[in-house]
Amino acid sequence: MNRREFVRHGSVVAALLAMGRLPVLARTGDTLPAAVEPVTGFLAGYAPPAPRRLRETYRLMYDIVLWHERAPATGITKNGLVGRVDLRRVGVPEGVRYSIDEVRRYAGIANRLTARLTCAGDRLGSLRAWESRASWRPLPDKSPLRHRLDALVVNGRKEHDRVLHSDGRQEDSARPLASLWSLIDFVARRGGPATDVSLDLLADLSSVSPGARLRYDGPVEVEVAGKRLLRLASYVLTGRGILPTNYLVDEPGLPQLVTVSMVSYALREVRAVDA
Amino acid sequence: MRPPNIVFVHVDQLHHAAISAYGCRYVHTPCIDRLVDEGTSFLESTTPMPQCCPARASWFTGRMSKEHGVVVNDVCPMDPTLPDLGAWLREKAGYDCVYAGKWHVTGRNVETSFRLLHPGHGYGELGDSNVARVACSFLWSRRSEQPFLLSVGLLNPHDCCYTAGASGGVGKFGLAAEMHGELPPLPANFDYGYARRQDLRVAEWTLDDWRYYRYVYYRMAEMVDREVGRIYEAVRRSPDADNTLFIFTSDHGDGLAFHANIQKGYMLEEAWRVPAVVCWPGHIEAGRRDAEHLVSGVDLAPTILDYAEAPPMPKMTVARSWRPLLERRGSPAGGWRDYVVGETSVGRMAVAIRDARVKTIVYPDAVQLFDIESDPLEMHDLASEPGSEAGLARHRAHLADYLNSIQVFEPPPGHADAAAVARYYEPCVSWYRRLREEVSA
């Protein structure tokens, strides 16, 4: 926020505070729960896929929802879409394989990250090996991407309690290793009020955040498009190098929302895995 | 040997002590810790001005804010006649000057001075990992023998401005109560500041909200730590590893609940001081923590030019190269500075003078004086107490020396941003003119 914005917003906030009309920050009970705080403006237009139970094999398409600002008077955020994630899960002989294709569009550039995760067939779907490839493509109109960038490929694997990255880094990981995306399946199909697990997170598919905790965070009700009430179970992921991340799962077990802080993910579509 | 490649990685709003290597128990920054282990840290490092645009303009010009003209974010453009590091190194030393991520120097298009690889995004959460990957792609795919300056601007922990901004932000502060046991405690000077505070942005915060702010801030510091580590690892494993100087710093600090403050723009230690680490295995001593020399972000330009064996840019009045300190080549010519100055034009204007022990903050209507050695948390303002006269007199002389050394930018008549200049710039330089007359008298 620049100084002008600061002064402008500051004046508005001060005036509303003086009138006793403004909760400065959303708290549970004041407005919407913390779990959906970053996407309150998005929810009114959100048409989530119909509730359903996920099978072993599925394909989930998420929109990436960006926070822009929060209207001081209403507490409602302004949100916009900046990309999408295509997540596929299939069973393989050694366990489970995820394919992730994420595109974040901003600054005139399509920033793409594709990855393949190989996971064990255990309860958490622990990560065993992964491949990631980052690439950049100019979008039409005034893209600043004028210099060629080679795609960046980084692979990794977990051996015993060590994570070995192909760029040479090595990190300790004594707990089961998970990623933001592999945890979706865990909360969707194995979560419940008793959920409270300790794990290591491969944050951004690049670095180990050791000692993370994923726990049940209670029920959440939000109103979405068409004034439809969506009942969700919230799970919160916290830990070193992780902003509190909420997974919001509907009653049959469809993971509808993943909210972080500036960046959140909203389920747009469930497809057959070969679609 | 040809001059080294230089990788300058800068983060945004990192508190000088939010680093585990320096003893902070509430954050884990293994990658910055590695820099501390493999390089030389300046523990008495400050920003020329604790706000993004002015500080960054100083990095790239070697001039203080009233010299380059960028006195607040976004509205006062830089003196268009000034050279900057990118263009200067390219033209005078044949460097390939490339940039990725946050630039934010008002009035200067980064592409006039650098090859822009990627502009990044204003939110670290969205853009930092991508910017770091772009930097790694550049480092690994480079084939040229031409020396390069790679400047990488990472955003976090600046996202704290949005999670706790004036408009409320996106902070999940509702989690604060249920995470009570995991939240870091408040700093020892919180109550001191809280009793004096008037910051309406946080007027309704509970103590748990304050602690939650710190919790999230530390997580953001950890997030940017891994991006710093990713880039540093790429440098160390690149073909140019042996001939690459790595510099790490932040544009300014953050309140982080010290003195019950958030954000920046003022001259207390939490906003003014910044981390600064320089690594070059085999050339710069590893693991050294220099608590003796007072350094500033304004010194980065002469330091980089010195290592690049490029001529100095004109009129870097108070900026000094760190190279003699880093290489321990005896006393720098003329000795090192015995005081450092920082200034702010955000909100309440101020100029701070710091020597080895004492710090003075001069406002248009007041003066504060702290004994930093015995009172590092600045909880005892000694300005009006008996015995402070000598310190105040010494700093008055330093201030006179400083004001007579800098060359205040005078915007030409018909300046394109005349309204902004009149509103924001002119009050600053008018005060400096008056101050110079007062302290020089």
Image (spheres, coloured by chain):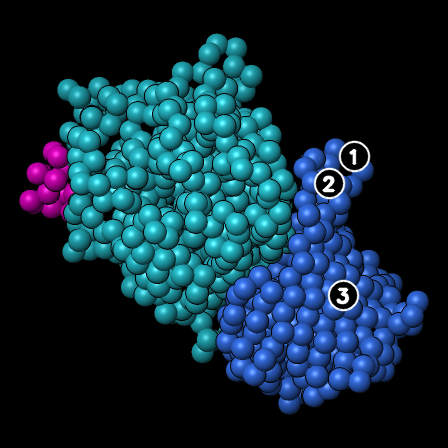
Chain colours: A blue, B cyan
What residue is pinned by disc 3? A100
Label 3 element class: strand
Segment tinted magenta in the rendering:
B379-394
- Mark 3 vs mark 2, foreground winner is 3
Is residue B312 on the magenta stretch?
A: no
Q: Residue type at mark 1?
A: Asp
What residue is pinned by disc 2? A108
- Mark 1 vs mark 3, foreground winner is 3
Label 1 element class: loop
- Give a yes or no on whether discs 3 and 2 share a subunit: yes
Which is the main secondary structure of the residues drawn in magenta?
loop
Residue at x-position 35% and y-position 60%: B37
Dot placed on the residue nearer the N-terminal end, 1 or 3 = 3
Dot placed on the residue nearer the N-terminal end, 2 or 1 = 2
Residue furthest toward the top?
B413
Q: Residue type at mark 3?
A: Ile
Q: Residue type at mark 2?
A: Gly
